[in-house]
Amino acid sequence: KGAVAQEQTQYFTRQGPVVFTDPGRKLAIAVRSVWGEPGAAPYLASLSTMRAGNFAEFDQALARWKTPSVNKTYADVDGHIAWTPAGYVPRRRGWPGMLPVPGSGDFEWAGHLERAEMPRLVDPETGFVATANEFNLPQDWDHQARPVGFEWTSGARAHRIHEVLSQISVHGPADSRRLQTDIRSIPALRLQRLLTPLSPTDGAARQARALILDWNGDMDAESAAAGL
């Protein structure tokens, strides 16, 4: 802002935009992403999912969700619920796509996973579906053949959500509000278990241990243990 006019040159390859160049080594690094693929307007697909009259229509609409994988949860007026990931997952033969590869043509995408190849959880016995971006693929999922994703967040939030929902037989708006503002820390409770058998000799360490152990694990703004 406020600078003189500038002119910059942008470079592109058939794989995607160039993000690094080393002219001396005749080297360029380009990034290919599903966001840049033809027809990748994923959020328009959400319009179709919102018009879906059943899970089959919802599932079919997700075929146009061309982004890196995301979690999708579903519920309808007939009481059916479901979870499934949606995304444009490239097929790579012999390489995972996590590191740079030569642009020689030997490492091209070979299409992508079809909608029918994605996992699904429909009307589970638990009575609910929930996700907090944790690793939640089925235990028997062949991640080598169908790598839906590579990055997940800590499972602590999902653990707490499942813990709360498992204790409620009828879930209403008030329960949702309480869960939305829930401040119980699963890592804090795990830390308590780790500290319990320890007997520190340092006075400050003993004080810190006592503070953590004498705590309900809620991340209150006024809690010294939460700050520690």
Image (tube, helix red, strand yellow):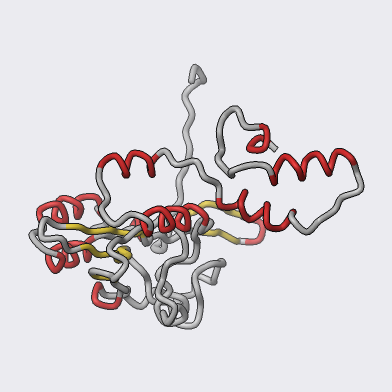
Q: Quadrant of residue 140?
A: bottom left
**Residue pictured at 56% horizontal, 38% vertical:** 219
Compared with 223, 11 (above or below) is below
x and y, in percent, of residue 175 in the image = 32, 44
Outermost top residue:
2
x and y, in percent, of residue 105 in the image = 45, 76
**Residue pictured at 47% horizontal, 65% vertical:** 135
As rendered, which of 216 and 222 lies closer to the eye? 216
Compared with 114, 5 (above or below) is above
Asked whether residue 59 is in view, the answer is yes
Outermost right residue:
201
Compared with 106, 156 (above or below) is above
Q: Is residue 114 left or right of residue 20?
A: left
Which quadrant does the C terminus fall into? Answer: top right
Asked whether residue 12 is in view, the answer is no
As rendered, which of 16 and 167 lies closer to the eye? 167
Compared with 175, 12 (above or below) is below
Q: How many marks?
A: 0
Q: Quadrant of residue 136?
A: bottom left
Q: Is residue 173 left or right of residue 225?
A: left
x and y, in percent, of residue 213 in the image = 69, 46
**Residue pictured at 43% horizontal, 74% vertical:** 147
x and y, in percent, of residue 19 in the image = 52, 51
As rendered, which of 178 and 87 lies closer to the eye? 178
As rendered, which of 200 and 96 lies closer to the eye? 200
